[in-house]
Image (cartoon, rainbow, N blue to C red):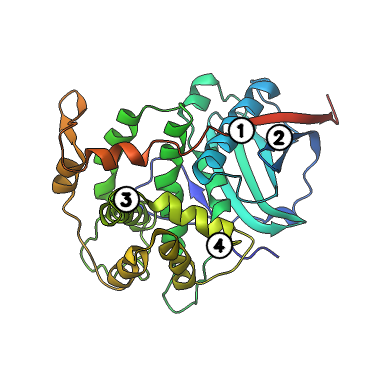
Amino acid sequence: MPSRRHVLLIAALFAFAVTAMPQPDRLNIPIVASYQIKVADSVLQVDFADGPLDLPKDVLLAHIQAAASAVATYYGRFPVPRARLLLIPVPGRHGILQGTTWGDMHGFPGFTRIRMGEHTNAADLAADWTTTHELVHMAFPSLPDDGNGIDQHWMEEGLATYIEPIARVMTGELAAQKIWSDMVRDMPKGEPGPGDQGLDHTHTWGRTYWGGALFCLVADVEIRRETQNRKGLQDALRAIVAAGGAIDQDWDLPRTLAIGDQATGTHVLTNQYNEWKDKPVTVDLPRLWSELGVTPGPDGIRFASNAPLANVREAITKPEGPVIPAALINRKEQGP
């Protein structure tokens, strides 16, 4: 059985909710085509469930390849040696409707299920972030929910929310100006509200996704500040994956963060978690944007190259090493 589930709601959400859905080991889903994508030393198996799709499979596979390449580029490798993505068409709909990722499913360390509308078009794919977001989930251990009000899925969802656009800038899919503009717009959603009891105890949609992303942004900047921009959150997360910390492992968060801290030679992650876990912490976002050289305006944002942390902003989205390509290596059609 899977260690935990991620449920991603991609509609216009005003409240955080989890919809119970049957797990894939309990579904009898006919597969009409199966493909294998090579990503560095890993293989991602892509299976298409039976159902109509307007877009050709080659177009959809290219989109999945781009997502896998972005994840591998950020982490320096694909996080698990074998993974499976099951794409399920939904008749009469359009767009990416929902994504869910599990660990340790039927011999695959990572398993992602994507529900896609029949009438999804090229513009929908260009706007999609769900595929990359879900594959990022494979690059972090499954965290516990102790049933006593402590739920650390904010870290899993926050990481995926923060890393997904950064990884896509690294591969050239997105522009840096676009994602910093989005952060200026969206990071305030992660700030604590009335009655907040810290990230471990406050399970609203905003705190889970954007509170977690805000934690990652602040940690990234602080690691780079302490190391004179020699290390960042990326180095911590790569070290966690290198130590075996992928989705098929059940680790506690302090252990995981300690590995990341060791890789950066700091205590940023551990200290920040201890501060944020059980009390509300508000971030002075206008000051942070100013330090990073991100200047909001009526026509979007401008970058100030002379800002104190402009080099930090640039380093966050700069790839370390070449972009890692993902290539189709095998296909098997099983139906029309």
Towards the viewer: 123 or 169: 169
Kind of residue at badge 2 = Ile
Relative placement, left or right, of 102 versus 34 is left
Q: Earlier in the sequence, mark 1 or mark 4?
A: 1
In the displayed structure, 9 sits above or below 60; it is: below
Ranked by sequence position, the earlier of labels 1 and 2 is: 2
Q: Determine the image quadrant of residue 58.
A: top right
C-beta proximity under 8 Å, tags 1 and 2: yes
Find residue 60 and report its image quarter: top right
Give residue 254's position: percent from left, percent from top: 44, 72
Q: Position of residue 27 (x, y in %)?
A: 75, 51
Mark 4, residue position: 141
* Amino acid type shown at disc 4: Pro
Q: Amino acid at mark 1?
A: Ile
User: For the residue marked with disc 3, what is the amino acid?
Assistant: Leu
Res 217 label? 3
Label located before the other in sequence (3 or 1):
1
Sequence order check, earlier mark of 2 and 3: 2
